[in-house]
């Protein structure tokens, strides 16, 4: 539950046959668990205890990056990598926020969205790999803290790696791209010819053009780049 801390308040001096007013101040300590709460105040006068209830609403602000789903982990340089990022609003206030993709600490994509209190939303981030060298990259998503947010540890989420490779360089002797487009890559795609995401043999890395099917367009792309190598 929510914890409160007494800040300030003065004693009430009772007036016969009249009423008296004072200001009482309290602070919500763990406001990330905000909501509707009842405060029960009691006082003693002439050995008689009087109790009154007051209702308060405490705002809480807490955004969390819950999950990152990327379309593949090997992508040909110049193609687009699609990421579906799930953001949870653990607070009780609707928020407008900014969500940013970092690739090895470099800003690569950014989107804004609205999220109701206690809600969840999936944000689509698209990384254009054209200006990135052939290499392994670590992906992370950062949600900019909103006003009043104190718990920011869950605003950042790091999700493994993605390799930007030569177009068509999908696999190698150890299962990773080996810097050359050859028959090993064509064979890898051919064994999955006509596969869809629901098929057991589906490999998103073999879907070179990311159209959610492995067909002659993918094999044609590999054939066009056959023999390409790096360095």
Image (tube, grey):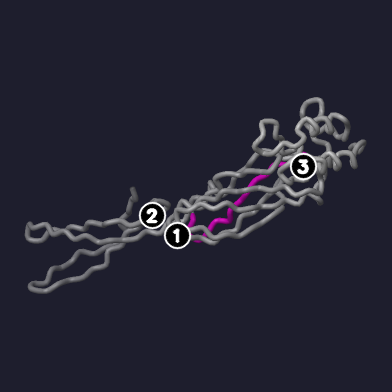
Label annotation for residue 34: 2
Q: Give the CA distance from mark 3 to mark 1.
A: 39 Å
Query: Which residue is the extreme one toward the right?
Result: 227
Instruction: Name the residue that disc number 3 marks.
Output: 75
Snapshot quadrant of residue 190: top right
Find numbered disc 1 in the image and state the secondary structure of the residue it sits on.
Answer: loop
Point out the frontmost of discs 3 and 2.
Answer: 3
Q: Is 100 one of the magenta-colored residues?
A: no
Point out the frontmost of discs 2 and 1.
Answer: 1
Snapshot quadrant of residue 15: bottom left
Find the magenta span and give its range. Answer: 136-149
Query: Which residue is the extreme one toward the front?
Result: 194
Q: Nearer the viewer, residue 101 or 13?
A: 101
Q: Mark 2 near mark 1, Cβ–Cβ under 8 Å?
A: yes
Q: Give the CA distance from mark 3 to mark 2.
A: 43 Å
Q: Residue at x 13, y 68 (%)?
A: 14
Q: Residue at x 66, y 43 (%)?
A: 70
Q: Residue 185, image x and y in percent? A: 83, 32
Find numbered disc 2 in the image and state the secondary structure of the residue it sits on.
Answer: loop
**N-terminal label among 2 and 1:** 2
Label annotation for residue 93: 1
Find numbered disc 3 in the image and state the secondary structure of the residue it sits on.
Answer: strand
Q: Nearer the viewer, residue 227 or 20?
A: 227
């Amino acid at each position: 539950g929510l914890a409160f801390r007494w800040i300030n308040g003065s004693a009430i001096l009772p007036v016969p046959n009249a009423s008296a007013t004072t200001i009482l101040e309290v602070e919500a300590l763990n406001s990330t668990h905000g909501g509707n709460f009842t405060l029960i105040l009691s006082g003693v006068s002439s050995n008689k205890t009087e109790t009154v209830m007051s209702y308060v609403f405490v705002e809480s602000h807490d955004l969390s990056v819950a999950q990152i789903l990327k379309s593949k982990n090997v992508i040909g340089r110049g193609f687009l990598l699609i990421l579906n990022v799930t953001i949870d609003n653990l607070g009780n206030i609707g928020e407008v926020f900014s969500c940013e993709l970092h690739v090895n600490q470099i800003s690569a994509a950014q989107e804004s969205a609205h999220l109701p209190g206690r809600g969840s939303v999936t944000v689509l981030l698209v990384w254009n790999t054209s200006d990135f060298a052939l290499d392994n990259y670590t992906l992370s998503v950062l949600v900019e803290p909103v006003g009043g947010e104190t718990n920011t540890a869950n605003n950042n989420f790091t999700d493994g790696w993605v390799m930007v490779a030569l177009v068509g360089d999908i696999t190698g002797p150890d299962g990773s791209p080996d810097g050359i487009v050859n028959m090993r890559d064509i064979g890898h795609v051919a064994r999955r010819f006509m596969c869809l995401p629901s098929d057991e043999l589906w490999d998103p890395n073999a879907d070179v053009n990311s159209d959610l099917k492995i067909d002659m367009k993918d094999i044609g792309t590999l054939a066009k780049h056959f023999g390409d190598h790096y360095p």
